[in-house]
Amino acid sequence: MMQKSICRSGIGAFAVFAMFAALISRADAQNYPTRPVTIVTPFAAGSVTDATARSIAAHLQETLGQPFVVENRAGAGGMLAASAVAKAAPDGYTLLITTNSTHSAAPGLFKVVPYDPIKDFTPVARIGSFPSLIAVNPNLPIKSMQGLVAYAKAKPGKLSFAHGNSTGHIAGEALKQRTKIDISRVPYRSNPTAMTDLIAGHVPLMVPDFGTALPQLKTQKIRPLAVLTKERSSTLPDVPTLHETVMPDFDLLAWAGLFAPAGLPAPIAERISGELQTMLSKPEVKQRMLNVGVEVFYTGPKEFDAYVKSELVKWTGLIKEVGIQPE
C-alpha cells in the first residue's frame, strides 16, 4: 500500500511539474520575442528564398515588435545554413527559412550531411512552393523541348545546363537520363549568378525558379521551354510542361518553409506559425509573392512535419532513380 501511495504521489508530482512547465512555456510565448531574432537562409541575396525570407521578416518585425534580421549563409547546397540553425538554442531566436534543398535533397546528394533533417529541427510552417522551368539563351536555335533533345542528340556533349539549387540539379539529370542526351552540369551557388551567365551566353541552358526567371522572361532575355510541374502554371499558361513534351509523368515542385532547432517549445512555434498564417492568408500578400515566383501554401507545424517526412522519401527516391551519385 505504501509503495502504491508513493507511486501515486510521484505521478501526481510529475503531473503538477508538467502543468507548471506548460504554463511557463505559454507565458514565454506570450512575451516572445524580447530581443532581435535572426532568420538564416541558405541562398544568396537576390534569390527567391532570400526575397521570401525578407518579406516574412518584415511582417514578423511589424507584428511582434522586435527586429527580425535575415542572414544569408550560402554554400554547400544549403547545408552551411541548416547546420548552423540545427546547433542553435531552441528558444525561437534563431530560425531557418529554407527549401527542399536542405531537407529533401541533401541526404541523397551528399555523402555527409552534418544534421538530421527530421530530428534536428522543429517544423514551424510551410510557406509555399517555388515552381521552376527549363530556359535557354534566345540566341540558340532551340524553341521547344523536342528541339532541345534533337539538338543535344545531334551535338552530343555540346550543351551544358546551369543550376543554383537542388531542384535544377535533379531536373537536369532527370532530363539527361530520361531522354538519353549528353549534356554537362554547371553548378552555381545560387540561381541569380547562374542567370547572369545564361543571359550573357556563357551557359546555354538553365533550370531556374520562377522568381529568378520571370523578370528575364518579361524582357525576353531568356526563352522558356517547359515547366517542371505536371500541370501548367497559371503564371506561365502558354509554357508547356515536361510531362506534355519529352518526359511523361515528370512532376517536380520545390517547397519553402520555416524551421527552428529541435526542441522549440510548442507555444512559441504556434505563435510564429499563427502570425505567418495571418500574413499568408491576405490576398494582396499572395499576389505580391506570386509576382516574385512564390505560390503561397500555408500549413501549420503538425501538417508541415508530416509533409517534410514524405518529401524526404520522394526526393531521395528520385535522386536514386536518375542515377545521381552522392558527392
Image (cartoon, rainbow, N blue to C red):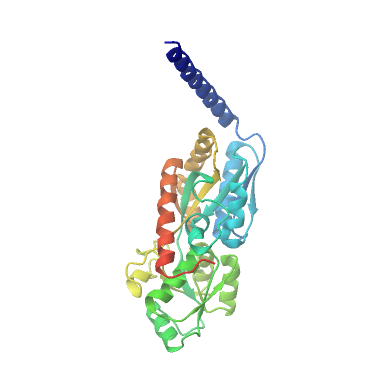
Q: Nearer the viewer, residue 256 or 295?
A: 256
- Vertical side of 302 occupied by 84: above or below: below
Residue 48 locus on image (x, y percent) = 54, 59
Q: Which of 127 and 114 is in front in this view?
A: 114
Q: Which of 308 and 282 is in front in this view?
A: 308
x and y percent of residue 275 in the render? 51, 39
Please tell me in which quadrant of the rendered image residue 175 appears.
bottom left
Name the side, left or right, on which 33 lies relative to 143: right
Position of the N terminus, as image quadrant, is top left
- Residue at left offset 60%, top offset 40%: 62
Task: Establish if 285 lies above or below 216.
Answer: above
| Residue shown at 51% from the left, 51% from the top | 117
Q: Quadrant of residue 29?
A: top right
- Which quadrant of the figure contains the C terminus? bottom right
Residue at x-position 46% and y-position 88%: 155
For image coordinates 50% across by 82% down, the residue present is 159
- Viewer can see residue 94: yes
Q: What is the x, y in percent for residue 265?
A: 54, 35
User: Can residue 253 be seen here?
Assistant: no
Q: Left or right? Give the position of 82 relative to 2.
A: right
